[in-house]
Image (tube, grey):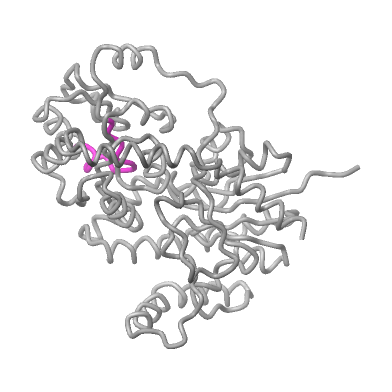
Amino acid sequence: MTYPTRIIIATIGSRGDVQPYINLAQGLHYAGYDVTLATNPTLCPLVEQHGVKATPVGRPVDMGAEAERLLEKSFDNMWIGMIRVMQLGGRLVEEAFPDVLAACQDADLVITSDTGSGVVEAEKLGKPWISVTLQPGRVPLVPEEKPSLLAKLFGWTLGKLFIGPTNRFRKKVGAPLVQDITTMLSSRMILLPVNRNVAAPDPRWKPQVRQTNYWYARPISDWTPPPELLDFLSRGEKPVVISLGVMGAAKSRQAAQVVLDAIQQVGVRAIIQGWGEVFAQMRVPPTVYSAGAMPHSWLFDQAAAIVHHGGFGTTAASLRSGAPSIVIPHIIDQYYWGQRVFELGVGPKPFTRAHLTVDKLAQSITQALTDAEMRRKAAELGVAIRDEPDGVVEAVELIEHVLQN
């Protein structure tokens, strides 16, 4: 009797750190592989809702509360926030190590993420492993013969922030030490699921890098839009969709009021995702629909413009929709995606949550709805992304090639 190849995907963090790997796991499952996603206990129900097996690793973490705490300690500074996130990520990976090690015992292949979970475990067990990164800036380059002073300074900073703590953890668990951040990525293959129209391939990338289209979720078989939402959509023009990601309760109340005031100032209809408990205590006009969790692939297709936090998956879904994006980054790589949206001409200049005001948001919404060139570019990029091959299918074929060699 033969058994299906067993694959473990390890990722720890918020929903944004997990959803792309759910999408990949769906594709691997449909291709006949025995795939399990090892992640935070709090996100296991989400994984299973998509028909993917999950195994809980580490302690339950309320990423909304953690993100709020980190932002308060970071004074809304991007660099301080990055340090805080890296520190939290390192702690979560260390805490989850025994559980991830146990999950990988019988694996034929381990797939690791930007969190670094699974790397030490695969090395200790002698398991083949490949990497995924959602950040084009993290893709390793062929070394320069004479690195610039800036490159040397960046490498030294990364060493202090990341390599040092990583090596302390590795020494504690008896794993080989690493020299730099690139050795935390697989020498077999590094998958980058970012559409080529959004981040063009770089000839300096190391040869094991493989770029695919975005990994979009497969439809949830029993999901249908709420009838009251369909009724709302039928009663007027396309709304603006607001989906600002994970926030703590205090920040949610502040942001919700700003968003409601900006929408009324512009005079548009809106669907606001999340903040249900906050809206239950506020006076919400009939031009606003309060939505819970639902597939972005469907929701964003209903939008005239999308206001979001610049998370990887949310950005991918918004670009695919063809509607302009207004990005309000909270932390770490969201700043990169907000800037990239602006550089592509498919959204206004991003501004941080610390600078979220009624007037600034109203101006950005107005620009996204009335700037004909921006709307044209956003629509064309959406078509280009939808016309590219299915990124999950591409990734599954690349992974199969690794398994066969």
Task: Give coordinates of residue 211: x percent, y percent.
Answer: 53, 55
Q: How many marks?
A: 0
Give the side of residue 295 with respect to residue 289, left or right: right
In the image, residue 142 sits, relative to residue 330, either above or below, namely: below
Residue in front for this viewpoint, 392 or 110:
392
Q: Is residue 357 magenta?
A: no
Task: Give coordinates of residue 49: x percent, y percent.
Answer: 55, 31
What residue appears at the point 55 percent right and 42 percent down from the top-left corner?
A: 389
What residue appears at the point 27 percent right and 29 percent down from the top-left corner?
A: 304
Residue in front for this viewpoint, 237 or 115:
237
Give the side of residue 228 with respect to residue 109, left or right: left
Q: Residue furthest right?
A: 1
Quarter of the image with the N terminus in it: top right
In which image quadrant can residue 331 be found?
bottom left
Give the side of residue 225 with respect to residue 286, left or right: right
Span shown in magenta: 241-253
Q: Is residue 244 magenta?
A: yes
Q: Residue furthest bottom?
A: 146
In the image, residue 43 sits, relative to residue 95, either above or below, namely: above
What residue appears at the point 63 percent right and 74 percent down from the top-left corner?
A: 175
In which image quadrant can residue 233 be found?
top left
In which image quadrant can residue 75 be found?
bottom left
Task: Give coordinates of residue 279: x percent, y percent.
Answer: 23, 26
Task: Give coordinates of residue 14: x percent, y percent.
Answer: 43, 47
Quarter of the image with the C terminus in it: bottom right
Residue in front for this viewpoint, 109 or 362:
362
